[in-house]
Amino acid sequence: MTVKEAIRAQAEDAQQIRGMDEIRDEAAHTSPDAPAATVAAGRAAQELGLRRSEFELAVHLGLIAVTAGPGGGRPRVPEGEVARLREDPGFPDGLAERVRTVGTADGAALLGIAAARFTRLARAGCVSPVTFYLNRYRAVVWLYLADELASFAVREPELLAGRTPLGMRTMLEAGGDWRARNWRTQRIERLLDRTGDPWARAAVEATALDPAHLAEVVEDPYERAYLARVRPEPVFGRAGSVAARETLGQLMLADDPDEILWRRINLTLGLDGAREARPAPHPGEDHEARTAPAPSPARSPAPRAAPPRPLPVVESATLPSPPAGDLPSGVREPGRKRLLARLGWRRRSAG
């Protein structure tokens, strides 16, 4: 499919996709009195015409609702969810297309550009990978949603041809690469979408910080242990090889100073809300009293600061950074303690 065909297909399917989202949202807020019948994930994937990897990606993206298995077993899919997806007018091609992933070569062909240009666009943060795998040389191979690439072609057609903007060239020449950072951001956002418990949400934020940064923000070792215990994981997580686990662990950690700072800010804000809801359990204290249910969904989650995004189309020789004085929602400049002091932020380059 060429980029022109992708643009036409997206325009034709826009209304249909919005209708699917509305139906899914309505179903998500329906609370039947009796528990719904469920099927195993493998059977659901077969009935939906998806490969197992495609099915797991659809769950990760929130396209398919799942429920916890009995006794904490593997997640299951409500029969009503399978029926809803099968009744969609675009089934089965519509769902399969929304989870179709492509690598650099196929992504470049889809956009009608050279593979080298596609890589530059990805490194500059114009398109974000949704997952990855390790090739036989143990190198990370990023995969992108074909649907998102088509959206990018519609949104930014001027970046597919012509001279690269100055700001993007400067960033790339300096060795900038936003692929892992964008993948982390999307992964964290999707995990946060699936939990309302304030401690679990704080635990998701903590996954982007290495032990040294985490200890500076969360000084109480019992709180750190509690964050590790309540941390939500992807619905379907495969252990994989040792190399895959090590690579995943490295990619999950923020590695740029401004990203680390924003992650520390989000964790600090999340901890404020979690401590207000309930304290972390300590040895010798009533565990049941300290692991109360999550607050009502009507209560808004703790405010979060969004990490700065790359601005490839801006003709600037400087990299994007948070505007001076533009504090994230929920942060008060004056107060008992300034936010940076509470973060325990250190200028590591100062010696």
Image: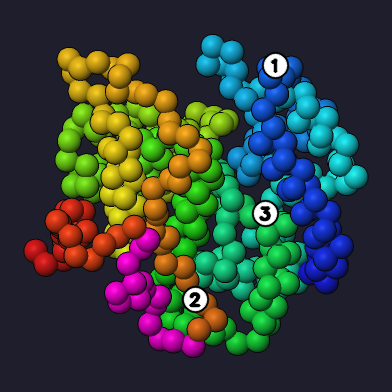
Which residue is located at x 72 percent, y 56 percent?
A: 146
Give above or below for 239 relative to 108.
above
Question: Could you give the CA–CA distance between mark 3 and mark 2, rounded to whole angstroms?
Answer: 21 Å
**Is residue 247 something one can see in this rendering?**
no
What residue did someone put label 3 on?
145
Q: Magenta span has 178?
A: no
What residue did someone put label 1 on?
34
What residue type is disc 2 on?
A: Leu
Span highlighted in magenta in the image? 315-329
Q: Position of residue 277 (x, y in %)?
A: 33, 35
**Is residue 230 something one can see in this rendering?**
yes
- For the stretch drawn in magenta, the main secondary structure is loop
Mark 1 vs 2, N-terminal side: 1
Q: Are marks 1 and 2 in contact (CB under 8 Å)?
A: no
Q: In the figure, is residue 305 to the left or right of 156?
A: left
What residue did someone put label 2 on?
311
In the image as oriented, which residue stretches furthest toward the top? 71
Give above or below for 40 relative to 89.
above
Q: In the figure, is residue 224 to the left or right of 160?
A: left
Q: In the figure, is residue 186 to the left or right of 58?
A: left
